[in-house]
Image: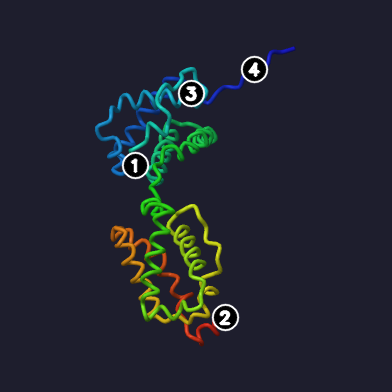
Amino acid sequence: MEPVQEQATLYDKLGGEFTIRKLVDEFYTRVLGDPDLSPVFEGKDINRLKRHQALFLSQALGGPKEYDGREMEVAHKGLGISDAQFDKVAQHLVDTLADLGVASDNIQQIVALVAPLKSAIVERQPSLYDKLGGEGAIKSVVEGFYQRVLADPLLSPIFEGKDINRLKRHQALFLSQALGGPKEYDGRSMFDAHKDFLISEAQFGAVAGHLVETLRGHEVGQEDIDTVIGAIAPLKTDIVMDHFTRWLKGG
């Protein structure tokens, strides 16, 4: 019985340690020459990074050397790396491999090994839901918002006979979803929820104004207020209507 021959690793196919070192050197030349990426490396020990990169690639590609650095998430925390920057780094890696004459199928295997690291390397920005303070802050905003709205003579007639607590709950869920929170709005569509109110342009504007003032009262910055209003503004076409518009929309 003939002995089973072991399959060559990607590390061996690429040419072992010599090629890995050359790959890392040329890869860093590209990355450091990229104006979108070079700021990430300002003040960093590039030789140390190259060593860790070479060890990581050696281990990932089946070589004899083991990566002894920090976990990916820990090593990249605080660098503020975006999705676009990660993608550019990946492209530089692909281009470097191609210039070194690495076969396309091997390049694809290497990319498949690197791609899952994205979730640990890219620093996700906190959602506006988190920035505002989460569920407690949203509930507080909704309470303050409804206090303003129900005290406004232009708006209070809309809510006569309505279940305000139910409306508050739906409002909180809607804001949570719109601002990137974990709760999902489970109410009716904007059109169905508002078609019987016959809300005018002036009333919609007044509601938006009360929301802005409520957010300011919670010390939300103007940039974040603009984001909130930007999420709500497109709803105007489903909320503002007269009898004819409602008829046209099948309401």
Q: Which quadrant holds the N terminus?
A: top right
Q: Do the CB atoms of the residues marked 3 and 4 lie less than 8 Å apart?
A: no
Report crowding for label 1: few under 14, some 14 to 19, many 20 or more residues within 10 A (C-alpha).
some
- Determine which residue is flagged by label 1: 80
Q: Earlier in the sequence, mark 1 or mark 2?
A: 1
Q: Do the CB atoms of the residues marked 4 and 2 lie less than 8 Å apart?
A: no
| Label 3 SS | helix
Query: Which of pointers 3 and 2 indicates the residue nearer the eye?
Result: 2
Q: Is residue 99 left or right of residue 243?
A: left
Give the residue type that dot 1 points to. Gly
- Determine which residue is flagged by label 4: 5
Query: Which of pointers 1 and 2 indicates the residue nearer the eye?
Result: 2
Q: Nearer the viewer, residue 64 or 73?
A: 73
Q: Earlier in the sequence, mark 3 or mark 1?
A: 3
- The Cα–Cα distance between marks 3 and 1, rounded to whole angstroms, is 26 Å
Question: Which residue occupies 31% across, 44% down?
Answer: 36
User: Residue 251 has which mark?
Assistant: 2
Q: List x then y, in percent, for residue 87.
A: 42, 43
Count of numbered badges drawn on the protein:
4
Which of the 4 quarters of the picture holds residue 2? top right
Q: Is residue 146 left or right of residue 116?
A: left
Q: List x then y, in percent, for residue 189.
A: 54, 69
Q: Indicate whether 188 appears above or below 181.
A: below
